[in-house]
Amino acid sequence: MTALTDKLGVNDYGMYFNNNIDYEKFKSNWDYDMQMMSRLPINWIRIGYGYWEANINPDGSFNFDRLDYAINSALANGFKVIIPFFATFDGYKTPPDYQTALQNFKKLVTETITHLRNKAVVFEAVDEAFSGNHFWMNQPISDDVINDIMNINFLINQLSVAFNSKAEFINGDFNGPGNPVYVANANKAIAKGMLTHGTHVSYHPYQKGNPELMLSLPSETEFLNTLKSTGLSVSVTEFGYGSPNNFNGSYSRQQQSDYTLRQIFLLDMLGVEHIVYFTMDNSDKTWSLQGNYYDTGVVKGEKPAFNLVGNQLQELLIEVYGYSFKNRIETTPDDFCLVYEKDDELDKLIYWTTSTSHTFNGLLMTSTPQIMELSEPIVANENNFNNIVLDRLDSSNIIKNYQINLNILKKSFSEIVSFLEMYGLKYHSEIFADLSQYDKLDRNFLFALQEEIKKIDRTINNYIETFDSTSWLRGGDYDDYQGYSLFDTGEFKCTLNRYWNKFETNTNVLLGTINTIQRR
C-alpha cells in the first residue's frame, strides 16, 4: 500500500502567473514558497496554469518562462508535479467571445503539453469546469458546454499519451459533491463516457463543517462511490479549510489545523491516491500554511516560518513519514483510532474525537489528532484511571452532595499528585474540609462552601498549569471559564452544578492525559 507521505502534496496555484507582478518578484515569491514546501514530508506539487495575458508574448505566442521556472525548481527539489488547466478569465483585460476563448484554450493546452513533453509531469483535467461560469470562460453549463469540456479533457489525455504511451492522466477535476447542481453536471459527463480514459479521477471534497461529514453525508459517499465504480484511482487534488472565513465556513487557525489533519487521514483511510492540500501560495493568506512573503518580513530578510497550521502539519506528518494506513480500530462513531504500519518499525496510532475531550481505552481523545507508537495492541476497556462522574445536586441536601463529590475529587487528586511526583514535578493538594460541622444551610455554611469550592478550583487550575508547562495538555479541551459566585444568583443548584461540570471535565482531561502518557 502507498505510504501516506507519498500521496501528499500541496497546491501552489500560481497567483503570480496571472497578475501584474514582474518576473523577479514572481521568482522571489516562488522561491520562498518552495523553501517552505521543502520542509514538509510531501511528494507532489500541483501548479495550475491557464490562458493568462501575463504568459502571452506581444506576438501572440506563449511565454512559458514562469511555468518552466516553477516546474524546474519543483523537480530539482525532488517533487513530482501535477499540471491542471484553468479555464478562467482572470488573466484577460478584455475577455473575448466564447468561441474565440475556446480556441485560445485549445491552443494553450496543445502548446503547453508539447512544450513540456520531455518533463516528468502529470497532467490533470480542467479545474472545476463543471461548475461553469467563472471556472469555464464565464459560460453557464449546458449540454453543448459539457461536450466542450469533455473534448478539451480528451485532448489533454490524447496529447499526454502521444508523447508518452505510459503517461498518467488525472481526469475529472470535479468540484466537491456539496452542490447538487455541480454533481448533476458531473454525472451527465460521466454518463456520456468522460471517464473512459485516464489513469485517475480527481475531485475536491471541501467540507462545510467537520471533515468526518465525508463518511456520513449521502451526497459525499454516493459521489465517491460513483468515481470508484469507474475503475480509475481516485485522487483529491484540492481540499482544506480557510481561516478566518471562506466559501466553506469560518474557522479559527486551530480548527483549520485540526480539520485539515483529520481530513488527510480520512482520505488516506478511504484509499485516495493523491491528497493535495490547497494551498501553499503565500499570497493566499486565508489558506496558506506559511506567512505572507511581505507581511512577515521575509522579503526584508526575516526568517521564514510556518503559521500554526503549517507547524502542526509538519510536526505530525513527519512522525508518519513512510507509514501506510493499516486499519481503523473499532470505536464509537465519534472516536477515530487509525493504525499505521511501516516495515521493520512499530505500528503507530493516530487518534482523535469529534466529540468533547474524554478518554477511550486509556487515550485522551481531543479534537486535535495525536500520535503514539503501539508497543502492544489496544485492549478493549483498558483504562488505568477511569473517568470520574460527580454527583449533581438535585435536592436540598447540599452537604451530602458536597461530601460525595469531595471524596471523588480527593481520590483523583491523589492519583494526579503521584503521577507528577514520578516525573519530579511536586505539587500537593490543599487540605479540604468536609463541612460536617454544619447542621443547617445558613449563611455561615454558604461562606464555608464558597471557600472550599475556591480551593478545589485553585487546585485543579494549578494542576493544569503544571501539565501545560510540559506540553502534555497540547490540544486539550479543558474548561477555563470564569468561576461563579455561589451568592451571585438565586439559582443555587444551577450554580453549584456548573462547578461540578467544570471540575468533572477538567479532572477527566488530566486523568486522560496521564493514561495516554503511561501508554507511550
Image (tube, rainbow, N blue to C red):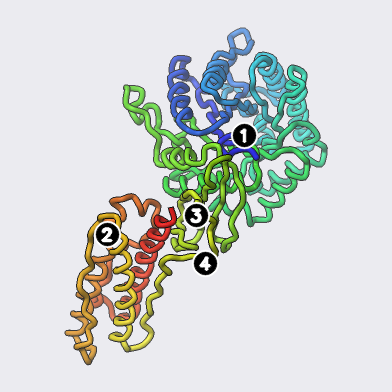
Residue 430 vs residue 189: left or right? Answer: left
> Extreme bottom residue here?
439
Q: Position of residue 89 (x, y in %)?
A: 61, 27
Q: CA distance from mark 4 to mark 1?
A: 53 Å
Q: Decide which of tag 4 and tag 1 comes sooner along the chain.
A: 1
Residue 8 vs residue 189: left or right? Answer: left
Q: In what element is the residue under mark 2?
A: helix
Q: Identify the residue shown where x is 23% and y is 59%.
A: 426
Q: Position of residue 402 (x, y in %)?
A: 30, 81
Which dot marks residue 134?
Answer: 1
Q: Mark 4, mark 1: which one is toward the viewer?
A: 4
Q: Identify the residue shown where x is 77% and y is 21%.
A: 165
Amino acid residing under circle 1: His
Quadrant of residue 435 within the rendered picture = bottom left
Q: Mark 4, mark 3: which one is toward the viewer?
A: 4
* Disc 2 + disc 4, Cβ < 8 Å: no
Q: Mark 2, mark 3: which one is toward the viewer?
A: 2
Q: CA distance from mark 2 to mark 3?
A: 28 Å
Q: Position of residue 296 (x, y in %)?
A: 35, 30
Q: Decide which of tag 2 and tag 4 comes sooner along the chain.
A: 4
Q: Identify the residue shown where x is 48% and y is 49%.
A: 373
Mark 1 neighbour density, 10 Å: few (under 14) some (14–19) many (20 or more): some
Up the image or down, 87 lies above or below 451; here it is above
Comparing 47 with 409, the one in front is 409
Tell me if I can see residue 269 in this picture: yes
Mark 2, residue position? 421
Mark 4, residue position? 381
Amino acid residing under circle 3: Trp
